[in-house]
Image (spheres, helix red, strand yellow):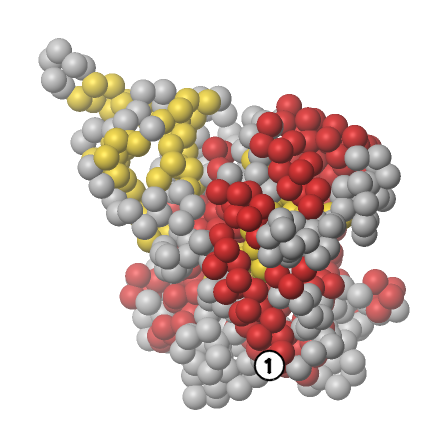
Amino acid sequence: MKNILVTFLLFLFGGTYTISIAQSQEKTPVHVFITAGQSNTDGRVNNKLLPSYIKELATDTIDYKQGQYPFCKISQNRGDGLFVPYWPKGRITDGLWTYDAITYYQIDKALREDFYVVKWAVGGTSIGFPNDTVKGRYWSANPEWLKNTASSQKKGKSLLLSFTEAIDASIDQTLSKIEQGYHIDAFLWHQGESDDRYAGDYYKNLKAVISHVRTHLTQKTGKNYLNLPFVFGSIPKANRHYRAEVDAAMRCIAEEDANAYLIDMSQGELQKDRTHFNEVSAEYLGQEMFKVLNQILDLSSTGFRVAKYKDDKDCAISYTFDDGLIEHYTLVAPRMEKLGFRGTFWINGNKINKDATAIADTTRMTWAQLKEMSDRGHEISNHGWAHKNFSRFPLEEIKEDIYKNDSALFAWTGKMPRTFCYPNNNKKAEPMKIAVENRVGTRTFQRSIGSKSTPEDLEKWVNNLIKTNDWGVGMTHGITYGYDAFRNPQRFWDHLEKVKALDDKVWVGTFEEVAAYTKEQKQLTYEITPQKKGFTITPHLSLEKSLFTEPLTGVVMGSKKVTVRQGGKKLKTQVRDGKVLFDFDPFGGEIVVR
């Protein structure tokens, strides 16, 4: 894509306004997208139902089976590494389309230069690999299973190997020969209906597929694709193969993987077979996928984006502490405050001392101390009233354990907990549905930073977060005593000091702050309208306004003198590394940038 720098020049005395556009002569790598999945990625909507704006590109105006996009080139279910001009078609049958036809059209329109797609899609296929599926071919990334099979193209049962072999052939035969080089921008995916029989394993299975593809691309190209954006859609609830466990697995992956973007298709419309998207759902998913890609990659060259993390920092870290130990109040909170940090403290209400005159457990805090920490900006949140393991107690008892703790924390701190930490890290599906209600996030992933961590381990962890633009959730209990206590507490204090020295790269926020920010950033959509003296951004966010209250950071590239207003109020801006940064309310309406 041409590198376009837009410079706004306002001549104050004459009152005239001009825009000059300078185009860089430097050639940038061509864009490449990879796409995979089952039937709703393969295509099951008749081409006669293509949107009118795509039909305009057809050379066959009866069945709309022929035509081509101006710039999109595709290698679809082929192993020779060659590309042809794109036109919507099913793997076997001409005249069928699905969501990616819309996505490629929008990319085509935005880039207006050649880009490439490697696609592998086969209907009726699962990730789980027992030999009882209709197709007998699977997406599984199970290492042992992959060792004992081959790609489906080589008479084996692995679709994942077919996909990666097709990518390799495309790189070897075509992409590596492009003069300006190439870059794989994203992995698009829709699948999961055929895993209704293996719903309980879907979380680990899909996670393994994502990791396998990212690792394979990194090893094949020598470039770092470990944080390759993964954009996928959920399964409509009307689908006859819908399973709540599969849906929960998708949402969990999107929540814990900073580079996974889930598009909610729960209300999606289907054809009469109650399995396949109709034209409405296919178009919607394709449009939403493009919106995600455009916000990640700025394909439309607007010069504006929403920062992945607050203040456009490279990564985020949340420090979380379980069980309400007294030294969280006496040691941890004061140390963090000296550095400008705030932590998240997960509380079991039945272990907290009522007041200082009636100490039942000298190892635990009092409610007054929790209130004080909350008032100083730390997050005090829910770890279950009695720490009841989700797999060991009836659902009603778990529900009571969660709600009772919410009520107590609200009564004592004046703030309703908006996050949850699973007792014993048990994440059984049915209780999880209760735990996530009216919350911005739950702790589904963490990294122990206690007794087993060395200074080198902790430094490597932080450096990797910066490298992969990820969110790290540190977890510990005791500092000087108790479960997982540090062998030498100074190790933790030194670690915090080192993180503080990386303040320009690392955002240290509470779990609630980062969880809310990342969800808002992923789900925000916006339109940009050019104006005489700049542009207007119109943000849209469908999340619950009362829950998601974190401001987002907007970034304007290539400018130094910018004024920004939202709702008539001038927003504070800062200039850093040739970018103008400003915080805005995602629910606050139009943003005027001049």
Q: Is residue 314 left or right of residue 127?
A: left
What's the residue at 81%, 50% (across, down)?
482
Residue sitting farthest toward the front: 357
Could you tell me which quadrant the C terminus lies in? top left
| Residue for badge 1 | 396
Q: Can I make out residue 112 in this image?
A: no
Q: How many marks?
A: 1
Residue sitting farthest toward the top: 13
| Residue 183 image offset from top left, x and y in percent | 59, 41
Kindly state the secondary structure of the residue where label 1 is placed: helix
Q: Can I make out residue 50 in this image?
A: yes
Choose top left, top right, bottom left or bottom right for residue 458. top right
Residue type pointed to by label 1:
Glu
| Residue 76 image offset from top left, x and y in percent | 59, 62
Viewer-nearest residue: 78 or 311:
311
As drawn, 441 above or below 578: below
Q: Is residue 572 left or right of residue 244?
A: left
